[in-house]
Amino acid sequence: MGNLKNKVAIVTGAGRGIGREIALLLAKEGAKVVVNDLGGAADGNGNDTKIADEVVNEIRELGGEAIANYQSVSDFESASSIVEAALNQFNRLDIVVNNAGILRDRMIFKMSEEEWDAVISVHLKGTFNMTRAAAPIFKEQKSGRFINFTSTSGLIGNVGQANYAAAKLGIAGLTKATALDMARYHVTANAISPFAWSRLIGSIPTESDSEKARVDNLKKMSPAHIAPLVAFLASEEAADVSGQIFGVRGKEIIVFSQPRPVRSVYDAEGWSVDKLSAIKSSLQSSFTPLEVSADVFPYPPLV
């Protein structure tokens, strides 16, 4: 314990689930924590300030230091205010954990513009807003940690989550770009794809046997399993780890591959539709299967 002594962290979406567990562990490791949570429902509606307050009280009861913040990461100016709150209270900032999120699941042929915009705004724009607000501070002090949250919904695929998948795959790209832009300033950026039961996935349908089995497996995976990897990535021990995508599935930690060329073909005279049709079968062995997360992770979680 004490790996984060004298560090200051912002954890967004820290009132419940994964964010709460992260905030508590960072505090146990010695960090001073800004517990940011709008206090909304899973779809982002509502505002209950006691959600963040309760986590702050837990941290203080453990002997740690924390303050609550209730602003929305989806607003650019509010994100700057969240960072300012850390600086005003604790005089520095070292760690930003971009965990806040909502769900508005819908099949692509039924999804509304509002459902699309709401999810993109909280997840992708919110992660950018917080990153943009903290990056100049990290650049100036030549240190800092960004820990973002992606999902297999974007990395692999899931049905009925076009907005969520797009946002989460966008966060993977944003994380890599941040890691590249900030590397010369000794600032790291990594992404985590969590597997854990939380209110955000509590609405998964359980009509078929396979869906019921999937939900039963998810219920075995605690949000507390995610927090140790976050605390490690926030520490000095992870100073040389950046631009990576990790997964946490129960007690299993995964390193995800990132897109790289797997096959190429060349024609000196250039390609035509007929030529491409002729060589299609030779390329298909290198195609990525149209899978969902459960196809790639068919085995029970290691808990």
Image: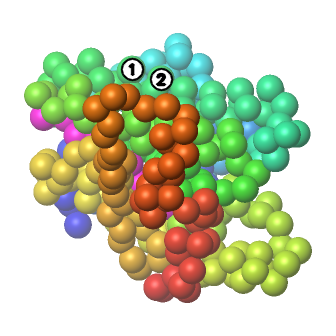
Q: Label for residue 151?
A: none
Closest to the observer, 256 or 94: 256
Which residue is drawn at the image coordinates 66% and 57% (left, top)?
158
Which image quadrant is residue 172 in?
A: top left
Q: Indicate whether residue 190 is drawn in magenta.
A: yes
Question: What colouring method underlies this structural image?
Answer: rainbow
Counting every numbered tag in the picture gives 2
* Residue 226 in view (yes/no): no
User: Which quadrant would the N terminus be assigned to in this image?
Assistant: bottom left
Question: What residue is disc 2 on?
Answer: 129
Magenta residues, start to end: 186-194
Which amino acid does the dot numbered 2 rest on?
Asn
Which residue is drawn at the image coordinates 14% and 48% (left, top)?
239
Q: Local crowd at mark 2 within 10 Å, few (<14), some, or many (≥20)? A: many
Which image quadrant is residue 78 in?
A: top right
Closest to the observer, 17 or 179: 179
* Residue 285 in view (yes/no): yes
Which residue is drawn at the image coordinates 54% and 39% (left, top)?
274
Label 1 SS: helix
Which residue is drawn at the image coordinates 69% and 77% (left, top)?
214
Q: Indicate whether residue 70 is drawn in magenta.
A: no
Q: Is residue 55 left or right of residue 254?
A: right
Instruction: Pinpoint residue 177: horizontal percent, then vertical percent.
Output: 31, 31
Distance from Cα at disc 1 to Cα at disc 2? 6 Å
Q: Is residue 227 above or below residue 84?
A: below
Which amino acid does the dot numbered 1 rest on?
Ala
Q: Is residue 70 above or below residue 31?
A: above
**C-beta proximity under 8 Å, tags 1 and 2:** yes
Instruction: Pinpoint residue 143: horizontal percent, then vertical percent.
Output: 16, 33
Q: Label for residue 133?
A: 1
